[in-house]
Image: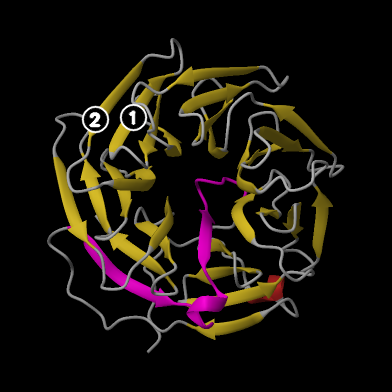
């Protein structure tokens, strides 16, 4: 049964933009539920592919990526070798990548209004034009880079992490040229633009938070807890950098101006992954592991609440979309899940 997502009205990535580029599918969603009194998963939008062949990972949507069309969530299918959209009419569009085995992972929108993504297995940065439906791919100079996250920097370039090489890369959207900067860290993983305008990143392997300027100058800060495996990172409304510690079960914060850390032990969340700050000021943390859930953390009073996910969920990356709801990729249910808070 077709369901609408209840998105805020706005220009969407219309079918005309994608004509000839992919197939559109109605979403297989769970039955409608009453308006929730407490935060919970309200919809599970099942992908039109078999679970082993999909593995949804990175998500992107406006206004978080300000150049993306509103009304559309973009996502990457690592094992499905495709990118796609979930639109406000509850339809998927899947777009197969030009080369097999590319492994798209992180995805965002560039200052040119085109969709850019990392190819973890293909060792490339990919680009998709919503205007003409064409793909372009740009090879990362260092082989076996294993690029994951990608973010639009304040300098107009797209910055990405190379988990296998310890480098931070930048691609010029006008020319496609790529510059790589050694970070001095091990396994840089996620990245975000900080309140100081620099790109900040997590380094899982060396238990560090790093920052890189547009000129390529890197600073590294050691996370206080050993073997923490810092994972996802976001900029909070308090202008701090908040990150999850996937191995220690903690939420961390680093001040951009002085590098001071604060850590919070999370309740019933041994493997915190992706996190986002909602419009209500709370952080919503994806808890992975044996009992997957969404944890709500109030940074003002420290209160924590845990909300169980659907049976079989394997949550991955999350966003706060344009309708102020949390969405996350779910490789277990082969879906994009909606969480209303």
In the displayed structure, 142 sits above or below 221; it is below
* Front residue (pair 153, 252): 252
Q: Position of residue 64 (x, y in %)?
A: 50, 45
Q: Are marks 1 and 2 in contact (CB under 8 Å)?
A: yes
Residue at which label 2 appears? 264
Task: Please identify the residue farthest to the top as the structure is shown.
Answer: 258
Task: Please identify the residue farthest to the bottom as the structure is shown.
Answer: 1
Residue stretch in magenta: 39-68
Is 47 left or right of 97, judged from the image as shown? left
Please identify the quarter of the rendering in which residue 142 is found. top right
Residue at point 67% right, 73% down?
Answer: 95
The reply to whether residue 235 is visible in this rendering is yes
Tell me the CA gap for discs 1 and 2. Answer: 6 Å
Quarter of the image that includes the N terminus: bottom left
Is 326 left or right of 170, judged from the image as shown? left
Q: Secondary structure at mark 1?
A: strand
* Front residue (pair 206, 272): 206
């Amino acid at each position: 049964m077709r369901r609408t997502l209840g998105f805020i009205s706005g220009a969407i990535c219309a079918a005309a933009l994608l004509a000839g580029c992919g197939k559109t599918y109605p979403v297989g969603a769970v039955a409608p539920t009453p308006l929730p009194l407490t935060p919970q998963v309200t919809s599970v939008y099942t992908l039109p592919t078999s679970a082993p062949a999909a593995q949804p990972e990175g998500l992107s949507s406006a206004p978080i990526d300000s150049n993306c069309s509103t009304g559309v969530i973009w996502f990457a299918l690592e094992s499905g070798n495709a990118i796609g959209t979930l639109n406000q009419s509850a339809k998927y569009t899947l777009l197969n990548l030009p080369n097999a085995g590319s492994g798209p992972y992180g995805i965002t929108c560039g200052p040119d209004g085109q969709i850019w993504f990392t190819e973890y297995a293909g060792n490339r940065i990919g680009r998709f034009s919503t205007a003409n439906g064409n793909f372009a791919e740009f090879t990362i100079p260092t082989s076996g880079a294993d690029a994951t996250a990608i973010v639009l920097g304040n300098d107009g370039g797209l910055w990405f992490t190379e988990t296998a090489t310890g480098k931070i890369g930048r691609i010029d959207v006008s020319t496609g040229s790529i510059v790589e900067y050694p970070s001095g860290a091990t396994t840089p993983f996620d990245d975000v633009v900080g309140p100081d305008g620099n790109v900040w990143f997590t380094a899982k392997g060396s238990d560090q938070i790093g920052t890189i300027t547009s000129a390529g100058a890197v600073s590294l800060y050691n996370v206080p807890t050993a073997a923490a495996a810092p994972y996802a990172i976001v900029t909070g409304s308090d202008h701090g950098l908040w990150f999850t510690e996937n191995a220690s079960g903690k939420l961390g914060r680093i001040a951009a101006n002085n590098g001071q850390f604060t850590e919070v032990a999370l309740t019933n969340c041994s493997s915190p992954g992706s996190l986002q700050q909602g419009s209500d000021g709370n952080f919503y943390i994806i808890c992975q592991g044996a009992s997957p859930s969404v944890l709500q953390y109030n940074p003002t009073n420290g209160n924590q609440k845990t909300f169980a996910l659907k049976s079989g969920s394997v949550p991955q990356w999350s966003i706060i979309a344009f309708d102020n709801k949390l969405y996350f990729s779910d490789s277990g249910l082969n879906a994009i899940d909606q969480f209303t808070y």
